Image (tube, helix red, strand yellow):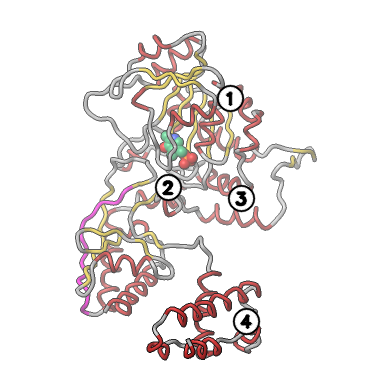
């Protein structure tokens, strides 16, 4: 203990460290309370080490001022770094839910900056000089693009479904096919959402086959809604049956019971024109006469997180006035981004070129091949002989529960490291600045150019240089 005391006495006081010129300088970068906390942490760390180490090893503990300052700086850097940060998506999964789903088009980004940095007419009608409606900014665009009578926007599609159910079927029954009682992910389960909204779920049919007659037979005095749900990330194939939109709408009209559809992804362009598997469009559900259609803003639409609702004016107006509407309302930056995103859809060709989500999904295979070859060449030229780098045909995915069966042909760069496992390489890439998120296949790390943005190749190279530094 005598010798430990000698070492403990060498530990500086917090105030002494604060007075060091190097530490004073840190206060131009970091908040002072954080610096004080950091000094305590670093000193406590040293104290703990002195107390726990055998006496004979005490010599090995670094007590110099310079090492203290270095540890303090590392601690501060880690604490103060933004938690939410840019990452490089090299997975080829376009709507990657864990990586923030869609990225915005240039005009949408500009709109967000404007909305965030100035006052706006968010709820002010400039023509009459009186209070206006938040929904007005996108309603006419939604109406023009989808052909619906009316539209509104809320925080996300989950809340759009919730609000629609609550408005139309609170305390009443809503009829849904068993095959559509799906879990979307992130614990969004249709039966749970229905229960929470106050609607009473009436399941009809079987998992694989549901007929229009099943719906008809389930209708009672208590029925307030027919509901159709897009199965999203899930497909029932083989011996199956679901009624067509027309049959569903026919029954709804005949009985005077409204019909809603949760479309999930909500694509506005028929992507089958470009060789992508067919996905029902919003316009088609509107044309079929569905009363309320809900879909996400940040899936195949390629905009900000939002829930869009289009349909009959009478119902949409009730939804706008519902007390829950305030709880699920959308903020001005989202609204700005959404308006700019939707404006690009006024001309589908312009959306195809400008919307990053659509553009990435439709990037031609030969362009991906040449981008993969360029990236492979750059890595091979710079990384030395510790790596085997080739390009190979691969499949990218749309992601986000959209088009789960779509296989988008791509060319990936496959990197095998001779001195480390693919898992170890993947970890170094993931811990780089910016982090590079890659896939692993067998013992190779795969980089898919489809989701790698312009200018990110250099950063990928420097992440691989980190592999050489850390693992060799
Ligand atoms: C994704 C999805 C949702 C949830 O949408 P969010 O915008 O993520 O809230 C609901 N229903 C279906 C069918 C979906 O695909």
Residue occupied by mark 4: 14
Residue occupied by mark 2: 352
Ranked by sequence position, the earlier of labels 2 and 4 is 4
Ligand 1 quarter of the rendering = top left
Q: Contact, CB < 8 Å: mark 2 with mark 4?
A: no
- Mark 4 vs mark 1, foreground winner is 4
Residue 467 lies, in percent from the top left, at 31, 74
Q: Contact, CB < 8 Å: mark 4 with mark 1?
A: no
Task: Rate crowding at label 1 as few (under 14), some (14 to 19) or many (20 or more) other CA atoms within 10 Å.
Answer: many
Along the viewing direction, whichever of 323 and 414 lies nearer the viewer: 323
Along the viewing direction, whichever of 279 and 188 lies nearer the viewer: 188
Residue 275 lies, in percent from the top left, at 29, 42
State yes or no: Cβ of the residue under disc 3 lies below 8 Å from any atom of ligand 1.
no
Residue occupied by mark 3: 333
For residue 368, the mark is none
Q: Between marks 2 and 3, how big is the CA–CA gap?
A: 23 Å
Task: Rate crowding at label 3 as few (under 14), some (14 to 19) or many (20 or more) other CA atoms within 10 Å.
Answer: some
Which region is colored magenta?
A: 385-397
**In the rendered image, the vertical position of residue 214 relative to residue 295, given as above or below:** above
- Mark 3 vs mark 1, foreground winner is 1
Q: Main secondary structure of the magenta part?
A: strand
Q: Residue 33, located in which quarter of the rendered image?
A: bottom right
Q: How many marks?
A: 4
Residue 316 lies, in percent from the top left, at 59, 27
As for residue 392 lying within the magenta part, the answer is yes
Task: Rate crowding at label 2 as few (under 14), some (14 to 19) or many (20 or more) other CA atoms within 10 Å.
Answer: some
Q: Between marks 3 and 1, how big is the CA–CA gap?
A: 26 Å
């Amino acid at each position: 203990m005598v010798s430990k005391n000698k070492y403990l006495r060498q530990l500086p006081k917090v105030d002494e460290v604060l007075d060091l010129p190097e530490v004073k300088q840190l206060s131009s970068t970091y908040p002072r309370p954080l610096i004080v906390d950091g000094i305590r942490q670093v000193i406590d760390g040293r104290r703990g080490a002195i107390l726990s180490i055998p006496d004979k090893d005490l010599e090995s503990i670094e007590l110099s001022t310079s090492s203290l300052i270095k540890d303090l700086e590392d601690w501060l850097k880690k604490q103060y770094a933004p938690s939410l940060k840019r990452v490089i998506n090299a997975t080829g999964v376009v709507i990657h839910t864990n990586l923030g789903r869609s990225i915005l088009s240039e005009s949408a980004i500009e709109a967000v900056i404007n909305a965030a940095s100035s006052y706006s007419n968010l709820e002010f009608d400039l023509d009459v000089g009186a209070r206006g409606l938040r929904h007005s900014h996108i309603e006419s665009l939604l109406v023009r693009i989808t052909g619906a009578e009316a539209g509104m926007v809320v925080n996300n599609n989950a809340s759009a479904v919730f609000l629609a159910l609550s408005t139309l079927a609170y305390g009443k029954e809503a009829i849904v096919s068993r095959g559509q009682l799906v879990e979307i992910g992130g614990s969004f389960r249709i039966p749970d959402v229905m229960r929470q909204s106050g609607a009473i779920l009436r399941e009809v049919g079987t998992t694989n086959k549901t007929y229009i007659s099943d719906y008809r037979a389930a209708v009672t005095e208590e029925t307030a809604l027919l509901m159709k749900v897009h199965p999203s990330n899930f497909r029932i194939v083989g011996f199956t049956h679901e009624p067509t939109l027309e049959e569903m709408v026919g029954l709804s009209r005949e009985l005077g019971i409204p019909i809603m559809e949760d479309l999930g992804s909500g694509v506005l362009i028929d992507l089958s024109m470009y060789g992508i598997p067919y996905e029902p469009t919003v316009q088609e559900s509107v044309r079929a006469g569905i009363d309320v259609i809900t879909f996400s803003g940040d899936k195949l639409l390629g905009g900000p997180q939002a829930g869009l609702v289009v349909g009959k004016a009478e119902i949409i107006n009730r939804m706008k006035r519902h007390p829950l509407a305030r709880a699920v309302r959308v903020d001005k930056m989202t609204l700005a981004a959404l308006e700019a995103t939707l404006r690009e859809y006024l001309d589908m060709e312009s959306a195809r070129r400008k919307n990053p989500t659509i553009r990435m999904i439709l990037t031609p295979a030969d362009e991906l091949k040449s981008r993969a070859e360029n990236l492979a060449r750059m890595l091979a030229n710079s990384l030395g002989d510790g790596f085997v780098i080739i390009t190979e045909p691969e499949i990218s995915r749309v992601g986000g529960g959209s088009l789960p069966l779509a296989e988008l042909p791509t060319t990936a760069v496959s990197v095998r490291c001779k001195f480390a496992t693919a898992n170890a390489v993947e970890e170094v890439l993931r811990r780089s600045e910016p982090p590079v998120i890659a896939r692993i296949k067998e013992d190779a790390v795969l980089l898919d150019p489809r989701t790698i943005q312009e200018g990110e190749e250099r950063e990928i190279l420097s992440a691989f240089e980190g592999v050489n530094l850390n693992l060799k």
